[in-house]
Image (tube, rainbow, N blue to C red):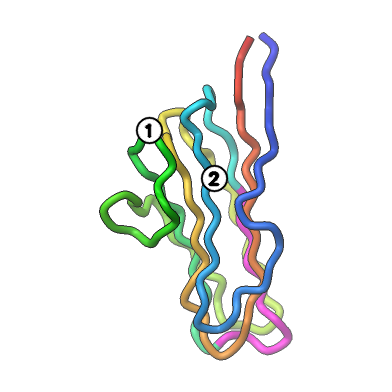
């Protein structure tokens, strides 16, 4: 069986300022096989006062909802923290089920210092 895969960038490597929120989202309604999501949080030479959280959210919608925190459309399925230690790197990989319709990654909560964040998806688009 031949597989068609597609690399998707949800959040390119970016600085998430203290007190800020960085989000990325993707519509997976056309994808047939889910994928693998990777996230990365990198603290600077001075760690944040409060850690950055990465929330993984899904929406049960046939069209991609506006970016937002958990609420009416988006539902949290996992959360990971980046800690407060200077230069600490947190990397997580998680499978995304084929049943997921819309996916969002949200980095938020760090105070005192900026942190570097990123999220990528290897999406299985078709199985032939």
* Whether residue 113 is situated above or below residue 55 in the rendered picture: below
Whether residue 54 is situated above or below residue 98 in the rendered picture: below
**Quadrant for the N terminus in the image:** top right
Examine the structure image and report whether residue 45 is included in the region drawn in magenta. yes
Q: Name the residue under label 1.
A: 62
Where residue 43 sits: x, y (%)?
A: 66, 77
Give the quarter of the image for residue 91.
Answer: bottom right
Query: Given this view, does label 2 or label 1 mark the residue nearer the observer?
Result: 1
Residue 95 x %, y %? 53, 39
Residue interval drawn in magenta: 38-48
Dot 2 lies on which element?
A: strand
Q: What is the C-alpha distance between the residues marked 2 and 1? A: 23 Å
Image point 52% across, 49% down: which residue?
Answer: 25
Q: Is residue 56 magenta?
A: no
Instruction: Determine which quarter of the picture holds residue 118.
Output: bottom right
Would you identify the image quadrant in which residue 116 lies?
bottom right
Q: Which residue is drawn at 71% across and 79% down?
A: 87
The residue indicated by pointer 2 is 94
Q: Which residue is drawn at 68% across and 89% down?
A: 46
**As drawn, is 74 to the left or to the right of 29?**
left
């Amino acid at each position: 069986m031949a597989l068609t895969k597609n690399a998707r960038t949800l959040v390119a490597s970016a600085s998430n300022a203290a007190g800020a929120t960085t989000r990325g989202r993707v519509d997976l309604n056309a994808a047939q096989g889910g994928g693998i999501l990777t996230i990365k949080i990198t603290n600077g030479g001075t760690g944040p006062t409060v850690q950055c959280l990465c929330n993984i959210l899904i929406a049960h919608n046939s069209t991609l909802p506006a970016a937002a925190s958990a609420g009416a459309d988006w539902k949290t399925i996992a959360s990971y923290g980046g800690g407060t230690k200077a230069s600490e790197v947190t990397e997580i990989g998680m499978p995304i089920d084929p049943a997921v319709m819309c996916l969002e990654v949200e980095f938020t909560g760090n105070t005192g210092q900026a942190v570097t964040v990123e999220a990528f998806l290897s999406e299985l688009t078709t199985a032939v």
